[in-house]
Amino acid sequence: MPEHLIPANFSDAETSLPEVDHWCRAVLSGSKARLLLLGPFMSGKTHNAYAALRRLLDAGYPPADLGTYRAYEMARDYDPRLIEQGPPVIFLDNLTDRSDNVAGIENLQPDEPDIQALMAVHQGAVADAAERLAGRARSSWIACASTRERLAVDLGDYVAAKLLAVADVVELPPRPQQPIKEW
């Protein structure tokens, strides 16, 4: 399994979601498919996406025709050509990281101006990548985010609406929480 495509912690990812089955069959048959996985933290969005990529690779899909990107890495080295001229199948993870990371935190103090500027550049790169992805007619993709509302907050109403309009949307329920073990 190509380590640059499937991280070790997802190397044995499996899924039983019918929407993922449909997406994989479409991609393997040469059709274009777009899947947006929504759900709360730890609901299995990323797991299901990597399980779909594993299925493609296990079926002989060329690794060179797959690209995986994490939104939190976008500010570092984002180039619009990653999406525009990227491979036929793209996985874009954590589109709503910005709001997910501060959800439920009260009395959040503003960051220093230079940190705010860096965060704005990062979020601009994520919004740009998501918009370009939604507009790529000749590609298949999977993207992950927490909710429709956070998509709109983090990417803007226009980009969120564009993603939602072109993708099959799957809303995953929260996973049952495991009891915390005492040490």
Image (cartoon, rainbow, N blue to C red):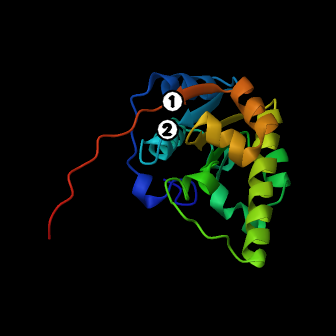
Task: Left or right? Give the position of 148 relative to 181.
Answer: right
* Residue sitting at x 43%, y 42%: 44
SS class of the residue under badge 2? Answer: loop
Asked whether disc 1 touches disc 2, contact meaning CB atoms under 8 Å apart, the reply is yes
Q: Amino acid at mark 2?
A: Gly
Give the class, few, some or many, for how many residues have Cα within 10 Å of label 1's Cα (few <14, many ≥20). Answer: some
Q: Quadrant of the C terminus?
A: bottom left
- Report which quarter residue 111 is drawn in: bottom right
Q: Which residue is mark 1?
A: 171
Q: Which residue is mark 2?
A: 39
Residue 173 visible in image: yes
- Report which quarter residue 175 is drawn in: top left
Q: Is residue 6 above or below residue 155?
A: below
- Report which quarter residue 121 is drawn in: bottom right
Q: CA distance from mark 1 to mark 2?
A: 6 Å
Q: Could you say where residue 130 lies in the image, as x and y percent from the top left?
A: 75, 44
Q: Is residue 4 above or below residue 43?
A: below
